[in-house]
Amino acid sequence: INNVACQTIFLNGSESLDETVGDLKIQLAPKTNFWSNTIGALQLAKTVEEFVEPISKMVILEVGCGVGLMSLMLSK
């Protein structure tokens, strides 16, 4: 493949997308890796929360997972 950087050109509207998953509101840039199925992401986060049972001083490390949606949802 090539090593040429691609430039994003906005023709109209905002340069970001506002998304809500459960109680979490996030702002996405054009090249952000994000779950397109927000209902599925919310259900997965609830399932992970049941298994992990996060506590206030727990450290959650989410590597290579886009915006870190699961960690953000579990941090509340």
Image (spheres, rainbow, N blue to C red):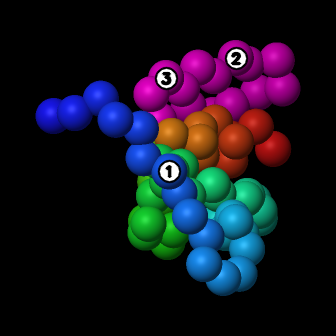
In this rendering, the label closer to the viewer, 3 or 1: 1
Label 3: how many Cα within 10 Å (few below 14, some 14–19, many 20+): few
Task: Look at mark 2 in the image and give the residue it sits on.
Answer: 59
Secondary structure type for disc 2 = loop
Q: Position of residue 20 (x, y in %)?
A: 69, 69
Task: Look at mark 3 in the image and give the residue it sits on.
Answer: 63
Identify the residue at image location x=66%, y=82%. 12
Label 1: how many Cα within 10 Å (few below 14, some 14–19, many 20+): few
13 up-or-down from 10: above or below: below
Q: How many marks?
A: 3
Q: Quadrant of the N terminus?
A: top left
Q: In this view of the protein, which residue sits in the foreground, 1 or 31?
A: 1
Residue that sits furthest to the left in the current view: 1
User: In the rendered structure, does residue 27 fall within the stretch colored magenta?
Assistant: no
The amino acid pointed to by label 1 is Gln
Residue range corresponding to the magenta coloring: 50-65
In this rendering, the label closer to the viewer, 1 or 2: 1
The amino acid pointed to by label 2 is Val
Identify the residue at image location x=45%, y=28%. 64
Residue 26 appears in the picture as rendered: yes
Q: CA distance from mark 3 to mark 2?
A: 13 Å
Identify the residue at image location x=56%, y=64%. 9
The amino acid pointed to by label 3 is Val
Question: Which callout, 1 or 2, points at the residue further toward the start of the chain?
Answer: 1
Q: CA distance from mark 1 to mark 2?
A: 36 Å
Task: Look at mark 1 in the image and give the residue it sits on.
Answer: 7
